[in-house]
Image (cartoon, rainbow, N blue to C red):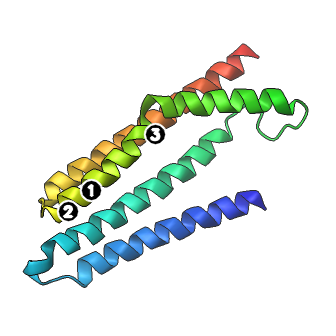
């Protein structure tokens, strides 16, 4: 049931992101509210990327050699926490807030779509680094066994 809850949360988040994106594209056509259009479009894209990355993070967690075992819960918790912290320490914790703030600030400053796309690409790269680091830590844990 917990897996289904996480799946539905990711689907709901992606749907919410698409909602923001669609509203931004089709509702705000007046040039005087260009900043609002940017805010909705790129907030929607950002929300989509956050929830897709969360889904990938949950998928990568299934690579954990102890995934699904309940024999040694304390060791499993310690190893899982180490792997998660290793991946997060590489890129994620600080950048999610920095990028969210920059999205809002740049949208309010009426930045061009190219700049906002570059910002979104930077966030995607940070997520990819975190996912890669977590995956490599799980592989290292598997080899250690």
**Mark closest to the chain's N terminus, 1 or 3:** 3
The numbered mark at residue 25 is: none
Residue of label 2: 107
Question: Does residue 65 appear in the picture of this structure?
Answer: no
Q: Residues within 10 Å of mark 1 (few under 14, many from 20)?
A: many
Residue of label 3: 93
Residue 118 in the image: state x and y as whole percent.
21, 48
Residue 130 in the image: state x and y as whole percent.
47, 35
Using the image as rendered, state which of residue 72 and residue 98 is in the foreground.
98
64 left or right, relative to 124: right
Residue 107 in the image: state x and y as whole percent.
20, 62
**Image marks 3 and 2: residues in contact by CB distance under 8 Å:** no
Residue of label 1: 103
Cα distance between the residues tagged 3 and 2 = 22 Å
84 left or right, relative to 77: left
Q: Is mark 1 on a helix, strand or loop?
A: helix
The residue that appears at 35% across and 39% down in the rendered structure is: 125
Q: How crowded is mark 2: few (under 14 residues within 10 Å), some or many (20 or more)?
A: many
- In this rendering, the answer to whether 74 lies above or below 45 is above
Q: Which residue lies furthest to the top in this view?
A: 144
Q: Residue furthest left?
A: 31
**Image marks 1 and 2: residues in contact by CB distance under 8 Å:** yes
């Amino acid at each position: 049931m917990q897996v289904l809850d996480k799946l539905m949360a990711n689907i709901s988040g992606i749907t919410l992101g698409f909602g923001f994106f669609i509203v931004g594209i089709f509702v705000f056509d007046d040039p005087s509210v260009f900043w609002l259009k940017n805010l909705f479009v790129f907030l929607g894209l950002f929300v989509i990327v956050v929830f897709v990355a969360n889904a990938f993070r949950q998928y990568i967690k299934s690579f954990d050699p102890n995934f699904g075992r309940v024999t040694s819960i304390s060791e499993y918790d310690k190893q899982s926490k180490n792997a998660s912290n290793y991946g997060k320490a590489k890129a994620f914790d600080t950048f999610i807030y920095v990028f969210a703030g920059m999205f809002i600030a740049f949208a309010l400053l009426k930045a061009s779509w190219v700049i906002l796309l570059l910002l979104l690409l930077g966030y995607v790269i940070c997520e990819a680094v975190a996912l890669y680091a977590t995956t490599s830590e799980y592989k290292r844990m598997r080899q250690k066994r």
